[in-house]
Image: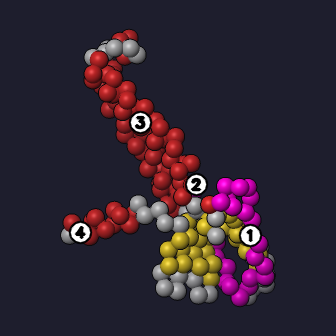
Amino acid sequence: RLEERWRKIVTYFDIRVRVDEGFRIVYRTYWLILWNAILPPTLAMITLVVLLVINLIFHAAWPWSYFHPLVRIIFFLAAFPLVGAWWWFMYEDWHNDTYIIEEETLKRIHRRPLWLQDEQSTILLRNVQGVSVSVKGIWQKLLNFGSVVVQTAADDGGQATGEIAFQYIYQ
């Protein structure tokens, strides 16, 4: 039971950008995009920890000397959960955006945390008319990631389906 929970946690925090699952390949945006998203809340959390240590060691030395101890306690009790929620939101936003290649379909799934947005695009492989790859800049070239745009023809109902863009994925 504990092993199963641990496996779920490890799987949730798996930042692999490409996972082969038999006849299904799941892509996520590149890990550099994740780091860019979680950097601000991570720096905010580090700042809070430093401020807390300063407060505990120096007992109300600057910059805390202007505030009543109760105000400082309330600040930390509110700030840590808020910054933690901010970090989780940014990670979850990255984690939920997937691009899936299956035997007959391509899917783009874009979900925002807390049910704020849920978009899914699916195209049939037999409708694919063109694929273009874009690698911009030295960092994308060195780290081997970029964008792929898949153009499609009309579907079975005669509807033009357009294109699906796979942004910032491992090449």
Label of residue 46 in the image: 3
Q: Quadrant of residue 165?
A: bottom right
Helix, strand or loop status at disc 3: helix
Q: Is residue 154 left or right of residue 105?
A: right
Q: Is residue 42 above or below residue 8?
A: above
Give the extent of the magenta segment: 117-142
Tell me, yes or no, if residue 116 can be seen here: no
Task: Find numbered disc 1 in the image and state the secondary structure of the residue it sits on.
Answer: strand
Q: Quadrant of residue 67?
A: top left
Could you tell me residue 163's position as x and y percent?
A: 74, 72
Query: In this rendering, is residue 135 above or below 32?
Result: below
- As shown in the figure, which amino acid type bears the numbered disc 1? Val
Q: Earlier in the sequence, mark 1 or mark 3?
A: 3
Q: Earlier in the sequence, mark 1 or mark 2?
A: 2
In the rendered view, does 99 fall on the left or right side of 11? Answer: right
Mark-to-mark CA distance, 4 and 1: 41 Å
Location of the N terminus (image quadrant): bottom left
Asked which quadrant contains residue 33, the reply is bottom right
Separation of residues labelled 1 and 3 (CA atoms) = 38 Å
Q: Position of residue 110 (x, y in %)?
A: 58, 63
Residue at image point 52% right, 86% down:
23
Q: Which residue is mark 2?
A: 33
Q: Which residue is mark 4?
A: 3
Residue furthest to the front in view is 142
Going by the numbered disc 2, the residue's amino acid type is: Ile
Q: Earlier in the sequence, mark 4 or mark 1?
A: 4
Give, as a three-letter code, the residue at label 3. Ile
CB under 8 Å between discs 1 and 3: no
